Image (spheres, rainbow, N blue to C red):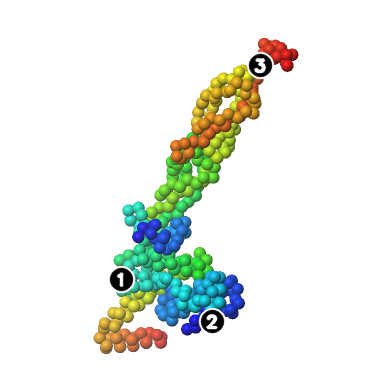
Amino acid sequence: MDEREFLARADLRPDRLQIWLETGWLAPAFREGAWHYVEIDLARAQLIQDLQHDLGINDEGIAVVLDLVDQVGGLRHVLQAVLRALRAQPAAIRRQIADDCAAHGRT
Amino acid sequence: MSDDPYAILGVKTDAAPDEIRKTYRKLARKLHPDLNPGNTEAEEQFKNVSRAYHLLNDPEKRARFDRGEIDISGVERPRQRYYRDFAEPSADHAYTSDAGFADFDADDILSEFFGRRGRSNLRRRGADPRYHLSLDFLDAVNGATHAVTLPDGATLDVRIPPGTRDGQMLRLRGKGEPGQGGAPPGDALIEIGVRPHPVFRREGDDIHFEQGVPLHAAVLGGRIAVSAPAGPVTLTIPKWSDSGKVLRLKGKGVPRTDGTAGDAYVKLLIKLPDRPDPELERVVAAWHRRV
């Protein structure tokens, strides 16, 4: 979606959006001289607005929260992929890996 | 789950709006689904807390609830799209972060999940640096081109549009800091200061100035050449014009963007000849005896 549609759907003022683009809080695709927004940008704008208004977090705090949310998201993504791959393994191998993990956990 | 918004938030029924907001914020920080990506219970609680807050935060809705006219089910909020629902299922988006395990150099197994984009996936528009440019009055009114030297030594030709005002901000698209990750550069913002002029004074789009008028033109009328901001113009002086009379030169003021221009207002000052003139003195003396 283009900037006009994004502003309307995110219920956002153009000057706020400009700041978010400059700080990197939002990073839509840039092609042929224009920003192109997708659903994840909209969801992220909603999260930023929640953090500002509902949670009362200031701008410095928001930068930290976004960074940690993205780190946790990355970790969860990888963990899910690893577990999915693990589930596809034969029972003996799964048992072996579970035992190894448990052994690491104790040291 | 209770249907009583006061109980959901844990506030008294006579709680002040400020207390309700503070309580809600505290709960929302704990329960927001994007801050609790693995906790489905938190999501359900957040939904309830958020409904309770949006009922009690609206004085009209709160009053109607207190009178028993509506219940909490009447304030379903449209939403919810949560960021995690878009960010987690894939690593193929701009916000992916591998910072949580970037130090796990385990045979590059993990980095393959993120490999396609690489680590530096930040896309950020360049910043908009501000500069100040001080202009001569006539350059601001008539327009000009000025070279501005930037802190890095580069020069930038700035076109000053005719009619530029003191304090106006000029935006030079794409002349700011470079963008990162393929994003566009920022804009250079140039704040204009206009130096005063010894003769001309600007009021909105009009120009005011004083003009000396020779005695004969003031008494008998005539046409004199005057310097307007855009150049010389001919001013028609009506017969018998006193000092302090203001004449308007239509369209000789400050140019506007729509092609029209303000007006120039000329205040006349009668000027005697540079040196005493015996003949003029005789004429005036004769005239004076008569009146």
**Image quadrant of residue B218?**
top right
Tell me the residue that label 2 is attached to: B7
CA gap between label 2 and label 3 equals: 97 Å
Please tell me which of labels 1 and 3 falls first in the chain: 1
Q: Residue at x 27, y 88 (%)?
A: A91
The C terminus of chain B sits in image quarter: top right
Residue furthest to the left: A90
**Mark 2 residue element:** helix
* Secondary structure of the residue carrying numbered label 1: helix
Residue drawn at (29%, 82%) of the image: A86
Q: CA distance from mark 2 to mark 1?
A: 49 Å
Q: Position of residue B124 (x, y in %)?
A: 40, 59
Three-letter amino acid code at disc 3?
Answer: Arg
Q: Secondary structure at mark 3?
A: loop
Q: Closer to the camera, A91 or B232?
A: B232
Q: Residue A36's image quarter?
A: bottom left
Circle nearer the N terminus (2, 1): 2
At label 2, the amino acid type is Ala
* Pick the front one: A57 or A50: A50
Q: Nearer the viewer, residue B291 or B43?
A: B291
